[in-house]
Image (spheres, grey):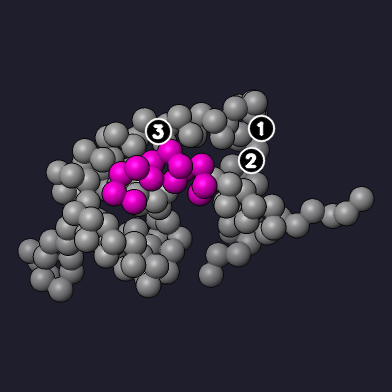
């Protein structure tokens, strides 16, 4: 029996998830799965000051990737960068009213997608899955 590759299996799963997510939520101003997850993160943390470095850390993305995503989101009027009162060089990332509205609309679709991902898995299997994911992530974190 051929040994399965963790990397290849995760890559295939990522492609399938991306296709499904973008099919579900792509109707909102070319919203991608990444955009939607970032909108959700900003919405949940709206009482905190969120900066680009926070998004980079939470989503494990590089600065250049975060800059590109945030530039598109700003161009589409989903977010705005606001100068921080303590340090005008720092820019807080905040949702616009349009961003809040789209986040609310896409949130239900994300919940439905998460339910689809978890279908046919027991609570124990899910717990074990997350334990394994955390171990794999810690093996490769830089």
Read off the residue under disc 1.
125
Residue 109 magenta-drawn? no
**Residue at 48% in and 34% down:** 113
Marker disc for residue 109: 3
Q: CA distance from mark 3 to mark 2?
A: 23 Å
**Residue at 22% in and 61% down:** 75
Marker disc for residue 129: 2
Q: Which residues are magenta?
A: 18-30
**Which element type, helix, strand or loop, lies under badge 2?**
helix
Which quadrant would residue 70 be assigned to in this image? bottom left
Mark 3 vs mark 2: give the one in front: 3
**Which element type, helix, strand or loop, lies under badge 1?**
helix
Image location of residue 26, percent across then percent down: 38, 45
Q: How busy is the neighbourhood of tag 3: few (under 14 within 10 Å), some, or many (20 plus)?
A: some
**Residue at 79% in and 53% down:** 4
Whether residue 86 is situated above or below residue 114 in the rendered picture: below
Mark 1 or mark 3: which comes first in sequence? 3
């Amino acid at each position: 029996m051929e040994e399965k590759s963790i990397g290849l299996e995760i890559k295939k799963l990522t492609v399938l998830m991306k296709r499904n997510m973008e099919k579900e939520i792509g109707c909102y101003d070319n919203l991608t799965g990444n955009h939607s997850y970032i909108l959700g993160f900003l919405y949940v943390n709206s009482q905190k000051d969120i900066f680009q470095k926070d998004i980079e850390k939470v989503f494990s993305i590089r600065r250049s990737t975060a800059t590109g995503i945030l530039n598109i989101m700003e161009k589409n009027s989903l977010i705005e960068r606001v100068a921080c009162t303590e340090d005008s060089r720092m820019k807080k990332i905040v949702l616009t009213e349009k961003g809040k509205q789209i986040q609310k609309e896409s949130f239900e679709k994300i919940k439905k997608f998460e339910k689809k991902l978890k279908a046919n898995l027991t609570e124990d299997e899910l717990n074990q899955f997350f334990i394994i994911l955390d171990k794999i992530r810690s093996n490769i974190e830089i």
